[in-house]
């Protein structure tokens, strides 16, 4: 979270909610009196509302809307509004057959006209949704839609998974505040800055949810923890720093994620500048030996245990554990002697005895920047720098605003966070065509072979075929974008998402969560139920 709510305001919110009867009257280990209701504090309020055409729902289920396809617990593609899809031989034409029993929450049928309208509106929204490769979307009949792409794109599948369908007849300026959809829930009341109340959608075609009413409280992590401790919420998202504290009547659920943190290195020598005049390149991190030494010297498990209270996993790529992850890309880390040898073999040595290796007149020293508002990234940056001292590399750590980072990230190492269910993220971060394109590939990484593998992955006609090429891009036995290859990043950890959950509440089997935007924990909300 970029903004923290002052403690006084937190207390005020909690007190006012209690006085107004917003919290369910429950306590201890008992479920609420209304057993089909829940009170959740699982994430921040979406600033722009609940419109999928401008980005709502891309990091988890859109809740009010449903999508053409979705991913199951194992992240395999399964049907939702779509009964199936076909891709043409040239990979450009995608045809989706729609189910015929889907209704919007206002009772009107969902047809191919709504799908066409949704994708047209999303393409024109100017938001983070990238539909620039979509040439045409058209209805073949009332329950069949054809998408024509300018170029083959296997990752278009993710657009069908993450784009909630909106009703053409009810999509206007107020839609983001008053959404109508075909998802499991419908919006009842939104008190901005405080809470959101939703009720089960009686027209939902899928598995009927157990809980008929859910209230989402928009609380900071500290306030959410306090509410859980007071027995006022059924689920609360908490930071790792609270994970060791026992809360009566609550259990801790640690969900595996690909919500990663890693160090991006500039990989070109210094000297060039961007069109805006910002410097490009770094004379130290442009040496592959420096980047690889950092990668194998860092003890990732130590970071997980020391900074995340054990709630996380070592990270080796931007997509650990996802279907396109190549486990061969992982390196043996915590290898101090191996890192020292790697540096020696590359001509780095400490000739003056100051503890810092050098090559000629160049010392192995560079800046590592992080967003100053993020305490986890600050801690990771400091810890990583401390671990690297032993191999003779000095890393100077400094926090900056995002505005400052935009100007400095092409010439300095930066601690970033990513993590998505879309393999296109890997393409954006590593392909040479995105070198210097905003936050994509800020280090100007370029490997012709890696570009070729990723281009072939995009042109593949199936996700299975594409995954083989994504894996080769990470490591093909000789080269790749991973630490075994060019090491343009040193991925550090994947954070676990931690939730305090009432002891007799099941939140189902959670899939690997993406980066921490939205409410990914509610992606399987239909599975939630009380247990004996």
Image (cartoon, rainbow, N blue to C red):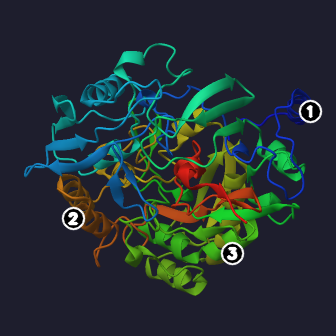
Quarter location, residue 10: top right
Residue 184 or residue 379, whichever sits in front: 184
Using the rendered image of the protein, determine whether residue 130 is visible from the camera's viewpoint.
yes
Residue 185 or residue 521, whichever sits in front: 185
Element under disc 3: helix
For residue 494, side relative to residue 20 (left or right): left
Residue 302 shows which numbered tag?
Answer: 3
Identify the residue at horizontal 69%, vertical 67% (top origin). Answer: 311
Identify the residue at horizontal 58%, vertical 63% (top origin). Answer: 494
Element under disc 2: helix
Q: CA distance from mark 3 to mark 2?
A: 36 Å
Q: Which residue is mark 2?
A: 465
Quarter location, residue 380: bottom right
Q: Provide residue 169's location: percent of width, then percent of height.
A: 37, 17
Using the rendered image of the protein, determine whether residue 414 is visible from the camera's viewpoint.
no
Task: Identify the mark nearer the N-term, 1 or 3.
Answer: 1
Identify the residue at horizontal 46%, vertical 23% (top origin). Answer: 106
Task: Identify the mark nearer the N-term, 3 or 2.
Answer: 3
Q: Nearer the viewer, mark 3 or mark 2?
A: 2
Element under disc 1: helix
Q: Is residue 401 above or below residue 447?
A: above
Task: Identify the mark nearer the N-term, 1 or 2.
Answer: 1
């Amino acid at each position: 979270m970029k903004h923290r709510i002052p403690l006084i305001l937190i207390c005020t919110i909690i007190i006012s909610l209690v006085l107004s009867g917003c919290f369910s009257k429950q306590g201890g280990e008992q479920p609420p009196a209304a057993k089909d209701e829940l009170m959740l504090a699982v994430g921040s309020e979406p600033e722009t509302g609940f419109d999928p055409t401008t980005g709502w729902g891309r990091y988890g289920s859109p809740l009010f809307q449903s999508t053409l396809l979705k991913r199951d617990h194992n992240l395999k593609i399964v049907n939702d509004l779509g009964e199936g899809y076909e891709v043409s031989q040239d990979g450009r034409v995608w045809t989706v057959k729609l189910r015929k029993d889907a209704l919007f929450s206002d009772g009107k049928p969902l047809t191919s006209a709504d799908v066409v309208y949704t994708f047209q509106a999303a393409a024109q929204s100017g938001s983070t949704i990238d539909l620039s490769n979509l040439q045409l979307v058209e209805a073949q009949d009332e329950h069949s839609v054809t998408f024509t792409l300018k170029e083959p794109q296997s990752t278009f599948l993710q657009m069908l998974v993450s784009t909630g369908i909106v009703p053409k007849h009810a999509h206007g300026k107020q839609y983001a505040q008053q959404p109508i959809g075909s998802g499991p829930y419908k919006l009842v009341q939104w008190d901005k800055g405080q809470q959101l109340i939703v009720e089960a959608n009686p027209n939902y075609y899928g598995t009927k949810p157990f809980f008929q009413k859910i209230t989402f409280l928009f609380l900071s992590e500290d306030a959410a923890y306090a509410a859980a401790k007071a027995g006022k919420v059924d689920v609360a998202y908490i930071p790792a720093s609270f994970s060791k504290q026992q809360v009566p009547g609550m259990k801790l659920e640690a969900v595996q994620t690909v919500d990663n943190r890693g160090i991006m290195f500039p990989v070109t020598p210094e000297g060039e500048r961007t069109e805006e005049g910002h410097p490009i390149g770094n004379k130290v991190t442009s040496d592959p030996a420096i980047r690889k030494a950092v990668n194998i010297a860092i003890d990732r498990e130590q970071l997980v245990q020391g900074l995340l209270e054990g709630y996380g996993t070592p990270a080796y790529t931007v997509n650990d554990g996802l279907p396109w992850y190549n486990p061969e890309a992982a390196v043996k880390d915590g290898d101090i002697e191996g890192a020292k040898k790697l540096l020696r073999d590359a001509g780095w040595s400490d000739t003056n005895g100051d503890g810092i290796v050098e090559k000629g007149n160049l010392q192995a020293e560079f800046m590592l920047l992080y967003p100053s508002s993020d305490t986890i990234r600050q801690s990771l940056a400091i810890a990583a720098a401390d671990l690297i001292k032993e191999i003779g590399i000095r890393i100077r750590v400094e926090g900056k605003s995002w505005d400052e980072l935009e100007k400095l990230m092409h010439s300095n190492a930066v601690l970033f966070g990513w993590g998505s269910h879309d393999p296109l993220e890997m393409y954006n971060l590593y392909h040479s065509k995105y070198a210097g394109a905003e936050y994509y590939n800020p280090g100007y990484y370029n490997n012709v072979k890696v570009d070729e593998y990723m281009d072939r992955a995009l042109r593949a006609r199936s996700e299975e075929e594409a995954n083989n090429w994504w894996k080769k891009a990470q490591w093909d036995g000789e080269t790749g974008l991973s630490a075994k290859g060019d090491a343009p990043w040193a991925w550090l950890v994947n954070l676990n998402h931690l939730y305090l959950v009432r002891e007799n509440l099941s939140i189902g089997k959670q899939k690997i969560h993406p980066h921490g935007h939205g409410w990914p924990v509610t992606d399987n909300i239909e599975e939630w139920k009380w247990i004996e």
